[in-house]
Structure formats: structure tokens, C-alpha cells
Amino acid sequence: MKKKINRYLVLTVFAALVATLIIAVAIFRNMYKNQVLSEMRTCAALINSLTTSEEELAAQYTEDVAGLRITLIDEDGSVLYDSDVDGTLENHADREEVQEAEAEGEGWTTRYSDSLDSELYYYAVKRDDGLILRISKEEASIWGIFTGTLTGIFIVAVVMFLACMFLARTITASIVHPIEKIAANIDSVSAEGIYEELVPFVMTIRAQHEDILKSAKMRQEFTANVSHELKTPLTSISGYAELIETGIAGEKDVQHFAHEIHRSAQRLLTMINDIIRLSELDSDKMSLAAAEVDLYAVASACVEGLRMNAQKNHISIRCSGSPCVIQGDKSMLEELIYNLCDNAIRYNKPHGSVEVTVEEQNDHIVLRVKDTGIGIPEESQDRVFERFYCVDKSRSKNTGGTGLGLAIVKHIVAQHNARIELKSKVGEGTEITVLFEKL
């Protein structure tokens, strides 16, 4: 970036110097032309006042006069006298300056002279006797003056260029310094001391950096939790299997140990399935198969599917409400309602109840799952949607909970651009509400 900015600044300076030089030369040449015209007009007036014929011209101007070429032209265009060329010259009636002098009294032009093999300025004026007096001067004299100043101009240009290069490096360093400071201190960077235009960019980068660190920490914690949670049922399975294998377990104990192995294996499979599901929901490739879904019908089907499990745990469960259509993924919505109801049954009290409600409320379709269970302490309510977080770990293990159900619910809610709310009191129960946008 430094090199790029520095290169652009140097090129800009170089282009500015070249453009300035070209403009200065153009202005200088135009000024010189005007000065030459004025001098030639003055010389022509002086010559006209001192001479009346070509013989007088030839007598008085036999040598170069201030670098001027003097020509006397007849009315028909024939050259009567030329101070630089001996002999006969071609007719000059078609020359631009001669024609202008005939028409307007004086004429002015610049043209290449074949006879002198150089570029010349021409000034012609019509005399009182009808003859045309023409004065010309070589353009090379302009470049001769300019060439004399070239050394000084070149030295000034080089000094300016070197000074501008130094300034370009200094300016580039001052521009890039705040950005380098940000890059070196991304963790502690603040909006102070940086360009105002960079503040939104810096804040975005900082937020992304914090998100990356947070995600890395969450992955690390998730890996540690997975290892710990998988280790428990595996240790249990290994221990019971070893007791059976070594014959320590009696015939009466084998059935009990087999039941414990089966229960731990089921817990292990449930946990692995939940981990896989979370990974799928975390994946960027996970897409929502959106369609119009009757949320009440999905909730009713889930309640019926869990009714036997609820009865087994002496819990009553029912669904109320009316048909409400939303835009969503049916399989994800089934999973969301299943996890909420399963948790409500799992952490309920004996002879408790679970009530599922689907209804319209203002601009939302509301899904509400309410139970009469053990409740969630206020200090734990912000964390229940974290992976592997369990309010009562011993109860989770006894009931087969993995601590991932509400984490899955949180992901599905986010996928549907919905909002989730939780109300709970210890010993009284929990109410979880999901608000979906109405079609």
C-alpha cells in the first residue's frame, strides 16, 4: 500500500511538472510572438521612413539587421529585393501575409521557408507607394533564448522532483501509520486517533475479530464439553461390560447391568445425533426449505407423538389454538416443537402438565409451551440456550437429557428470523414463547 500511494504521488508530481513546463513554454512562446510582432512592426515603420526604393534598401541593409530578413515586393507579387537571397525569387502574390497586407494594410503569419530551410515569422505592411515591405525572423531564435534557460529549468525541476519525492514518502508514511497501528493493535484499538472515514471500518473489523475469538472459545468449550459428556456414558458401558465379562456380576445382576448399558448407549446415541444436528445447523451450507406451514397442525402432531412418553412420566399434555400459517421449514419446526415439549416433560413434576398453544397475536404467530415443572433459577435463564448447559445435571442424566435441545431450538428460531422469550419461576414452571412473522 505504501509503495502504491508513493508511486501515485510521484507520478502525479512528475505529470504536474511536465504539464507546468509545457504550459510555461506555450505562454513564453506566445509572449515572444507578440513581442516579435511589435518589434517587426516598429522596424517596418522605421525602414519605411528611411527608404523609398529597393536601391536604398540594398544600400542601407546589406548586412543582417537584428536577425531580420527584409523583402520588398511589387504590387504584382514579384520580389524586388531580399536581404538574405541573391538572385530571382518566385512570385510572392499568393503568400498569406502579402495578401493580408494588400487587403488590410498589414499581415502576419508563421511559415516554413524553403529558400532558407527554417521556420520564420513574417510581417508585411503596404507602403504609400503600393509596394509591400515584408520583414521576417527565424523562429530558431526563440528556441535559442529558451535553450539558454534550459539548464536552470532542469536544475529547478530536479530539485522540485526530489523535494516532492521526499514529501511523498513523508505523506505516505503519515497516511499509512494509523492503519498500521490498527493492524498491530486490533485487540485494543479504539476510534480515537484514526481517520474519521475509517471509524466504521475499524469498528466492523473489531466486531468481526471479537466474533472470531468468541467463536473459537465456544468451539474450544464445545470440544471439551463433548469429550466430557461422551466419556460419562462410555465409562459406564465399559464398567458394566467388564463386570459381566469377568464374571463378577451374578446372574441376578446381569439383567440390571444390561439395562444400564442399554440406557447409556441410548444416551450416547441421542447425544451424537444432537451434536450432528447442531453441526448441520451451524453449517453455512444449511438452507431453509421454506414453504407455507400450518404451525398448529405441526404442534398437534408433535403433542400426539409425545403423549405416550408424557403418560409414562405421569404428565398430561395438550395442544390448543387455531390453524396459523407461517413461512418455514416443516421438519425444523417439528424438531423445534419436539425439543420444547420433550424438555417440558423431562423437567416436570409428577402429575404435572404441559400446555402447547398456537395463536395469532398482533403481527405475529405465537407458539407457547408452558409447563408446571421445576422451573429455572433467574441466574441460569440467560444460559439455558448454551450447549451442554444443564440447570440440574443429575436430573438430566437420569432422564437422558443431553443439554443440547435448547441450543438446537435457538438455531432453528434464528433460521426462521423469529424471536424467543423465556419466563420461569423455580418450583412453579417454565413458559417458552416463540414469535414468528405473520404472512
Image (cartoon, helix red, strand yellow):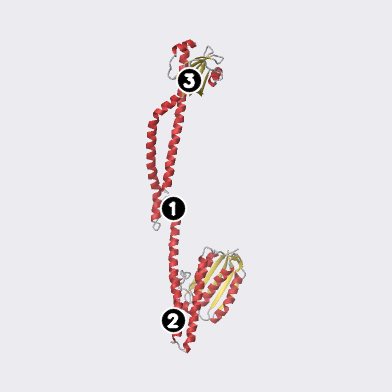
Residue highlighted by disc 2: 239
Q: Secondary structure at mark 3?
A: strand
79 sits left or right of 149 in the view: right
Marks 3 and 1, how far apart at CA:
68 Å
Reading the image, the residue beneath label 1 is: 199
Q: Quadrant of residue 95?
A: top right
Which residue type does callout 1 highlight?
A: Val
Q: Residues within 10 Å of mark 2 (few under 14, many from 20)?
A: some
Q: Residue furthest bottom?
A: 251
Q: Residue at x 47, y 89 (%)?
A: 251
Is the C terminus in the top left, top right, bottom left or bottom right quadrant?
bottom right
Q: Residue at x 50, y 69 (%)?
A: 407
Which class describes the residues within 10 Å of circle 3: few (<14), some (14-19), or many (20+)?
many
| Residue 265 position within the rendered picture, expressed as x and y whole percent measured from the top left | 49, 78
Left or right of 318 in this view: 387: left
Look at 48% across and 13% down and name the residue there.
48
Q: Position of residue 219 (x, y in %)?
A: 45, 66
Q: Which mark is residue 322?
A: none
N-term mark: 1 or 2: 1
Residue with the mark numbered 3: 136
Distance (Cα) linking label 2 and label 3: 119 Å
Q: How much space separates mark 1 and mark 2, taking CA atoms?
A: 59 Å
Query: Which quadrant would residue 94 be assigned to in this image?
Result: top right
Can the viewer see residue 428?
no
